Image: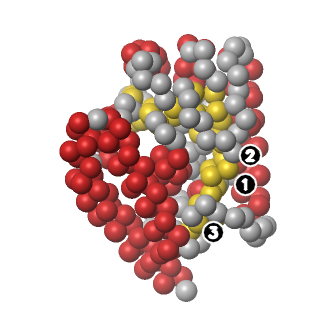
Amino acid sequence: MTALRYALSLIFIVQMYAVMVLMGLAFIPWALASKRGAQTGIRVFCRYVRASARLLCGLRSEVRGTVPDGAVIVAAKHQSFFDIIILCSVLPRPRFIMKRELRRAPVLGWYAVRIGCIPVDRGARGQAVAQMRADVAAGRSEPGQLVIYPQGTRVAPGARAPYKIGTAVLYADGDQPCVPVATNVGLFWPKRGILRRPGCAVVEFLPPIPPGLPADRFMQRLEHDIESASDALGRVCNQGIPVWSHF
């Protein structure tokens, strides 16, 4: 059974990247003409990935909570590529704070820049925060969901990593609520490796944090809400409690 799961996981990964290239090429004319075309292409691809993960790997995916559709900051737990896929499949106008190196990624990098994602250099924290503030301010004429990963990197389920100040800076700069997002996707789609485990990966939009909180209180609440909800999702899966899935 393990060998079969590895084989199906490898097939899934290969076809996923092949379809990424094919869909990327198919949507280029619309994406060049309009950002809406790029957003639609990304959304269609991400929904395809969710459906094919269920078909080939038995990996279902569920979105819980209220998906924001206005101008908000989305502060999400990041465990693997799959939580990005799920977010992009449901958010209407996502813009990610992303690593600068991703701009060079074939297909993915071009589409990310096209929809307004903001590349930053993680090696220089102070410069990165200043750059984020300037880039976000420059893009406020395009309302949407600004997605940031408060820990700055993928963190395995159950592991702990500090929450960085960049999220609080963006929150303080704008008169926008912040929507925390919890997940358990790392239990099924790890940070590294081929195996995609069967189960139900959940991305949960939590109650928004209203604007106006002091930075320290905001960071305490953000970390508490995301970590406690993500831990709860992990416990449910480890206990074998079934959950219903959208895909």
x and y percentages locating residue 100 in the rendered image: 34, 34
Circle 3: residue type = Gly
- Residue 199 tag number: 3
Circle 1: residue type = Leu
Whether residue 14 can be seen here? yes
x and y percentages locating residue 60 in the rendered image: 58, 66
Nearer the observer, 154 or 57: 57
x and y percentages locating residue 115 in the rendered image: 36, 35
- Residue 243 vs 221, above or below: the answer is below
Residue under the image location 75 percent in, 20 percent down? 217
The answer to whether the residue labelled 3 contacts the one labelled 1, judged by CB atoms less than 8 Å apart, is: no
Mark 3 nearby-residue class (10 Å; few <14, some 14–19, many ≥20): many
User: Label 3, label 2: how many angstroms apart (C-alpha)?
Assistant: 18 Å
Q: Is 136 left, or right, of 202 in this rendering?
A: left
Colour style of the rendered protein structure: secondary structure
The answer to whether the residue labelled 2 contacts the one labelled 1, judged by CB atoms less than 8 Å apart, is: yes
Residue under the image location 60 percent in, 15 percent down? 175
Q: Residue at label 1?
A: 233
Circle 2: residue type = Ala
* SS class, disc 1: helix
Q: Residue at label 2?
A: 229
> Total number of numbered labels?
3
- Residue 165 vs 246, above or below: the answer is above
Specify which label sits upstream in the sequence, 3 or 1.
Answer: 3
Which image quarter is the C terminus in?
Answer: bottom right
Specify which label sits upstream in the sequence, 3 or 2.
Answer: 3
